[in-house]
Image (spheres, helix red, strand yellow):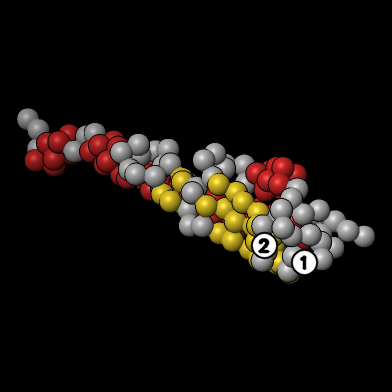
Amino acid sequence: MTTMRQRARFGQSGVTAVEFALISVALVLLLVGIVQFGLAMFIFDSAAEATRRGARLAVVSPVGSYARIETEMRYVMPLSEGCTMSIAWMPNSPQQCDARSCEYVVASVQGCTVWPWFAWFIDPLAVPAFATALPRESLGVD
């Protein structure tokens, strides 16, 4: 004959495993969310750094040297598929601007998105447009 205490103890067997299974799902989702948030912040920061580096390189490079500057910007921002990177020599376009008439350079990144890799049912997160303007320096002329 079993006592009430023995029945209660046997009725609780496996409860710890079930509780762990329920809690571990929530903890894994929280961990994956933290990692995804970190990835989004990395992309935001790398977009800002790409514009800073592109503008810095553009003010010391010859007017119209797009390829070299864009290559450097994409190196700083490795997850830049689908992003539009542009360099503008102001106040005129590069065809009308030379090292003496250009006043400043604007580097910008726009149109980037971050796709959540753990939740495919969520729309992509749009990265805000970043732009950096710097006054002209040598513009490749010594």
Q: Residue at x 55, y 50 (%)?
A: 43
Q: Residue farthest to the top?
A: 1
Left or right relative to 84: residue 73: right
Left or right relative to 23: residue 39: right
Residue 90 can be seen, yes or no: yes
Q: Earlier in the sequence, mark 1 or mark 2?
A: 2
Q: Nearer the viewer, residue 82 or 18?
A: 82
* Tag 1 secondary structure: loop
Q: Residue farthest to the front?
A: 96
Q: Nearer the viewer, residue 4 or 138?
A: 138
Residue 14 in the image: above or below residue 137:
above
Residue 48 rendering spot, x and y as whole percentages: 60, 58
Residue marked by disc 2: 92
Residues marked 1 and 2 touching at CB (< 8 Å): yes
Residue 88 rendering spot, x and y as whole percentages: 65, 57
Residue 108 in which image quadrant: bottom right
Question: What number is the disc on residue 101?
Answer: 1
